Amino acid sequence: MALLLLSPVLAGLALLVFFVDGRPVLFRQKRVGRNGHLFEILKFRTMCSSDAAQLPLTVAGDRRITYTGAILRKFKLDELPQFVNVLRGEMSFIGPRPEMPEYVQYQDALWRSVLEVRPGITDAATLVFRDEEQLLQSVADADSYYRATLLPAKLRIALRYRESRSLPRDLTLLWLTARYSIFPRNFDRERVLRALGAEAP
């Protein structure tokens, strides 16, 4: 139903990427799903096609990002093709964001707990760290900071949310995700933490 309702938007965005930035329209990347199974996540391409497969992390102001891509990323519109992943059963609406294989530590108990559930388009950690690209821009070594600080914090938030998950909380999460996608300048991390009953990372 979501794909049907969003089909005009998806078609319009696909045409925008095609006519402004060319092919390919979609960006495909291997991610780790439930129980460690790999799948191919779908996004609208936001980087120059020759650069998209290089450094895995993206920071604010990354020169690989196209002008169209910057707009799509600002409003999280590049994530919309993941409704196809949901339809395939690889993802759900709400769940921990799927990571690239190089960042997953299968021997870690925290990771094993997170991988017990299907990954999602949005979750509490994704919303709390909506400004992740800005945070990574402010550090000297983005990869080390992501591995040592951001990723463990995201995993802990995702696990705590799962343990206290309820329908009202899920509806709040979906509402806040939509709100901050439409009005990203109004993003308030503390408000998100309070609304979702999450602890500060």
Image (cartoon, rainbow, N blue to C red):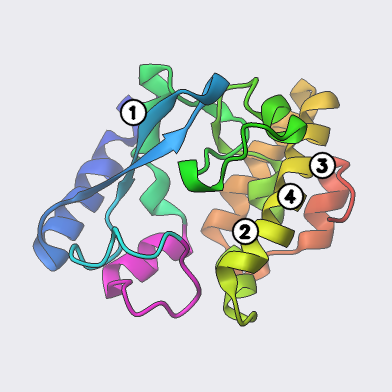
Asked if the stretch drawn in magenta spans residue 67, the answer is yes
Lower position in the chain sequence, tag 3 or tag 2: 2
| In the foreground, 8 or 146 | 146
Question: Which amino acid, mark 4?
Answer: Pro
Q: What secondary structure is found at the residue carrying circle 4?
A: helix
The residue located at (28%, 65%) in the rendering is 47
The residue located at (78%, 43%) in the rendering is 157
Q: What secondary structure is found at the residue carrying circle 3?
A: helix
Query: Which image quadrant for residue 166?
Result: top right
Asked if the stretch drawn in magenta spans residue 166, the answer is no
The vertical placement of 201 against 11, above or below, is: below
Which circle marks residue 196 in the picture? 3
The residue located at (42%, 61%) in the rendering is 73
Task: Determine the CA span between mark 3 and mark 4.
Answer: 19 Å
Which circle marks residue 48 in the picture? none
Picture quarter with the C terminus: bottom right
Image position, residue 71 (x, y; %): 37, 67
Q: Give the residue at mark 4.
A: 152
Lower position in the chain sequence, tag 2 or tag 1: 1
Which circle marks residue 130 in the picture? 2
Left-right relation of 136 to 190: left
Q: Give the residue at mark 1.
A: 84
Question: Which amino acid, mark 1?
Answer: Val
Over which residues does the magenta segment extend?
57-75
